[in-house]
Amino acid sequence: MATKTHNYNKLLPEIEEQIAKDRENNVINPYRADDKDAIRRKMDWDKNCILRPSYSRDIDKILHLPLYNRYNDKTQVFSLYHNDDITRRGLHVQLVSRIARNIGRLLGLNLDLIEAIALGHDIGHTPFGHAGERFLSSLLQKETGRYFNHNVHSTRVLDILYKRNVSLQVLDGVLCHNGEFEMNEYRPCALEDFSEYEGRVEACYRFGGEAIKTLVPMTLEGCVVRISDIIAYVGKDRQDAMIAKTIDDSFRFDELEAIGNTNAEIINNLVVDIVNNSYGKEYLKLSDEVYDAIKKAKKDNYEHIYLSPAVSELYDNTIEPMFKGLYYRLLDDVKEKNENSVIYKHHIAYIKDGLKYYEDFDYLKEEPNQIVADFIASMTDDYFIELHKHLFPDSRLSIEYKSYFSE
């Protein structure tokens, strides 16, 4: 049996030589985001300094948020497996950060800004991955006409709910990161101030994906995180599908010569292509061949993983009705101002009294459906399941994890 030869591309010799030369001569990328240019709601706070540069501060702000801890029990793609080898969202954001920093280092960009965007980009994600996001958006839209999208909610967590004075550059990168909308070329789109940013956020609530697909980050660093989000999951989700046995051991994805088929090949070859086509430029560029290949890889993932019955049936038949039951039970408690309810004790009081940063926030003046959406989005998978069991002890809906020892 022939051994498969792996395909790892290399940087073009002239690009590698130019990078080495620029490093030797201490050349600074003129398109790199500078810490001194960070824009904040409170400009007199969190000032840039040698000890704590602006975007390094933002990394710390994100890492120390309580919701950062919850990444580790949120679904990336596969829910309800007792299997430590299947990717959770906590690993995903680290992979995005690592890939993006590698690209940023080669391009001479601001690595702290990249890391802050990467670590915060999914902090508003729902339990149960994109299925949970879809269910929550459907409920919110039915009641208010507004859409829920995890990238928009991640900015709400950082900027509104926890008021951490995170920079506009980071918030913009988080808002624009959505990896479902790949592009052949990423040209940063200028953003002047918070007023313009808030207009973009509101458009996302009102028009959902139609508004989100038009977004492009204001910095090259944000553009790097956006493409790195795709790089981080395309091959890794294939690995996880094999581990979860949702695809047969004998199954093989179509060969994609431009980017390879293994996770390691995909990461390496996409990084190489981006750097070869983007070094020294004010934008990121993928070759046409690689762009077509990544679109094909994503299409194959949807067909064979994300939309497969093995993944979707449990979500549609069990998780979605659980979302609906929880949503309306919690909504009743908010509308009735039931201070003994779980949403008051575990969520409203937590934000209202315990997490003030630079100003008071009368959270109870928020629209009740938005409060419910905030709470559900903050939940881990396990908390969601336990809360449903607590509120509906006689429900026919039940969840059973796939054991470590299942065949």
Image (cartoon, grey):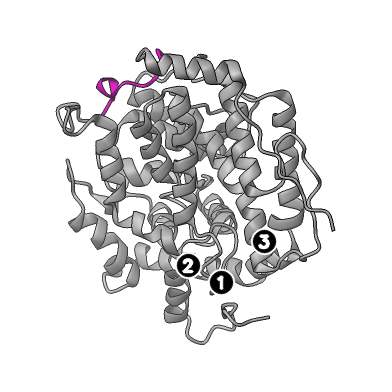
How crowded pointer 3 is (Cα within 10 Å; few <14, some 14-19, many 20+) is rated as many
- Label 2: element kind: helix
Is there a contact, CB below 8 Å, between mark 2 and mark 1? Answer: yes
In the shown orientation, is residue 155 left or right of residue 54? Answer: right
Across the whole image, how many numbered discs are drawn on residues?
3
Q: Nearer the viewer, mark 3 or mark 2?
A: 3
Task: Kindly tell me whether residue 49 is visible in this rendering.
Answer: yes
Q: Nearer the viewer, residue 112 or 69?
A: 112
Find residue 199 and report its horizontal and vertical position in percent.
43, 28
Q: Name the residue: 43% across, 41% down.
A: 118
Q: Which residue is mark 1?
A: 80
Q: Residue furthest bottom?
A: 394
Q: Nearer the viewer, residue 178 or 263?
A: 263
- What amino acid is labelled 1 in the image? Leu
How crowded pointer 2 is (Cα within 10 Å; few <14, some 14-19, many 20+) is rated as many
- Label 1: element kind: loop
Q: Name the residue: 60% across, 22% down.
A: 276
The stretch of residues the image draws in magenta is 28-40
Quadrant where the C terminus lies?
bottom right
Q: Name the residue: 39% across, 45% down.
A: 119
Q: Which residue is mark 2?
A: 381
Quadrant where the N terminus lies?
bottom right
Q: Name the residue: 47% across, 52% down.
A: 125
Q: Quadrant of residue 278?
A: top right
Find residue 259 and report its horizontal and vertical position in percent.
70, 37
Q: Earlier in the sequence, mark 3 or mark 1?
A: 1
Q: Nearer the viewer, mark 2 or mark 1?
A: 1
Q: Earlier in the sequence, mark 3 or mark 2?
A: 3
Q: Nearer the viewer, mark 3 or mark 1?
A: 3
- What amino acid is labelled 2 in the image? Asp
- What amino acid is labelled 3 in the image? Ala
Tell me the number on the disc at residue 241. 3
